[in-house]
Amino acid sequence: MSTNYSPSSTIIAGLDIGSSKTNVVITRLNDNNNPEILGAASVPSRGIRKGVIVNLEQAALTVTAVIEKAELQAGVTVESVILGVSGGHIELTKSKGVITIPSQKEVTADDIKRVIETATTIIIPPDREIIHVLPQSFSVDDQPGIKDPIGMTGSRLEVHVHIITVAATSVNNLIKSVYKAGFNTADIILKPLAAARALIKEEEKDEGCILIDIGASTTNYVIFTDGGIKHTGQLSIGGGHVTNDISYGMKTTLHIAEQIKCDHGSAIATSIPMQEQLEIPTPNGRTERIESRRLLSEIIQPRLEEILFLINEQIEKTGFKSHLSAGVILTGGVANTEYLEELAGEIFQLPIRIGMPYQFRGLDEFIKNPSFSTATGLSLYGLQSTPKLGNVSSPDEDKNFQKIVYRIQDWFNEFF
C-alpha cells in the first residue's frame, strides 16, 4: 500500500469531542489522490457532558492529549481541526425562499445562492447561530421537486431548506477548548452529517436510508431519500445509559461497567448460553466475582431496544420509512455490540448494516471501528471541501460568532 504523499498535500484532522470519549483521525491524500489515515487516537473525555463543555480547562487537556497521541502515531504535526458538533441544543427549522428571474433567463449558480440566502432570512433567537443550510428541493415556476435547477428557464425560483441551528455559546466553547489546547478550528460540522459522508454511498442516498449514530449520551440520526437529506433528529439517550444500567444491575463502577459492556456485551440475551460466564474485576484489576454473561445481556438488551424503538417511532412520524429501501446504517461505539444488527432488524423491519468508512486506506483497526466513523467523516470533509471558517485562532467570542454566520453563504452545495 502506498504511503507516499505529495509535498503540497494537506494534513487534515477530524476531531470528535464526545461525552465519553474524544476521537481524532489524521488524514492526507496520497500520491494516487486517495484519502489515507495516517494516525488516529481515542482518550476518555473530561470536562464534557452531553456534548457540551462544562469545564474548559479539562476539555482542553482532553483535546491536547488525543491530538498529541495521534500525531505521535502519524509522525506529522496538526495545526487545525475539522470539529464535530452535537448535543441537545441542536435544532432543525424548515424554511423556503422565493426569487424572481427576470426576462425568462436561465437559472444560474448566483440565482441559487440568492434564493437560499432569502430562505435563511428567518428570525432566530439571539443566542443561536446557523451552521448548516440544507436544500431539500427547488421549484421553477410551477415545476416542483427539482434537485438541480441550473440551466432551466423560468421566471420564479423557489427553494425549500432545512436550517440547522446551534446554541452559540456551546459551539464557541468547543472552539475555545480547541484553541486553548493549541490548535485552530478550520470548520464545524454536525456530527451525523460528517459520519454520513464517510459511511453512505450515493446509491444508498438515492434509494433512501437512515444513518443512526449511537453515542454515549445522545443518539443522532439523519434520513436520506432521492439523493438528499430529508430529516435529522436526535434522542437524549445513548450508550452511557447502558453503562449506567450495568453499573447498577451488576453493582460495579461505571468504569468497569463500560469495560465489560465493550468486552462481553450482547444485544440479544437469548443468544448467550446459560452457562457462559464473565469475570467482574475490581478497580485494581483483580477478579472480584464471576457472573453470568446472559445476565449482562439481559441488562443491555432492554435499553438498546428502547433506543431503537424510539428512533423507529420518530422515523414513522416523518412519513419517510416506506422510502428507505437501502435500510438502516448503524454507527457509533454501540454499533460494535454483538447481535445489534439482528435486534435492529427485528425492530425496524428494514435492511440493517454496520457503517464502516469505505473510501479510506491506512489503519484498518480504525477504519473498521464504528467508534471512529464521525472523526473519519470530519477528516474526509476536510479533504474533499474547502473549510468555511478558515482558521479560528481567536478566543474572541464575537469574532467566532461572525465567522460562523459568514460560512452559511457557501453551504448550499455541501450536502445536497
Image (spheres, helix red, strand yellow):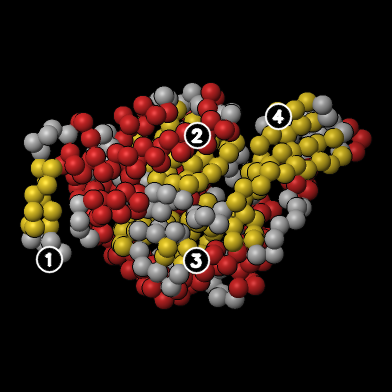
> Hey, which quadrant is residue 349 in on the image?
top left
Q: Residues within 10 Å of mark 4 (few under 14, many from 20)?
A: some
Q: Who comes first in sequence, dot 4 or dot 2?
A: 4
Q: Quadrant of the C terminus?
A: top right
Q: Which residue is mark 4?
A: 146
Q: In the rendered image, which quarter contains the N terminus?
A: top left
* Of the image marks 4 and 3, the number of the one nearer the N terminus: 4
Which residue is identified by label 3? Answer: 174
Tell me the quarter of the picture where residue 13 sits: bottom left
Give the CA separation, mark 1 to mark 3.
34 Å
Give the residue displayed 52% in from the left and 36% down from the top. 314
The local secondary structure at tag 2 comes to helix
The answer to which of marks 4 and 1 sits earlier in the sequence is: 4
Q: Position of residue 218 (x, y in %)?
A: 44, 51
Which numbered disc, 1 or 3, marks the residue closer to the eye?
Answer: 1
Q: CA distance from mark 2 to mark 3?
A: 32 Å
| Residue at x-position 56% and y-position 75% | 394
Q: Which secondary structure, mark 4?
A: strand
The tag earlier along the polypeptide, 1 or 2, is 1
- Residue placed at 39% from the left, 59% from the top? 19
Q: Is residue 40 left or right of residue 122?
A: left
Residue 342 versus residue 394 in the image, above or below: above
Q: Nearer the viewer, mark 4 or mark 1?
A: 1
- Residue corresponding to mark 1: 284
Q: Earlier in the sequence, mark 1 or mark 3?
A: 3
Residue that carries the numbered disc 2 in the rendered image: 313
Q: Amino acid at mark 4?
A: Ile
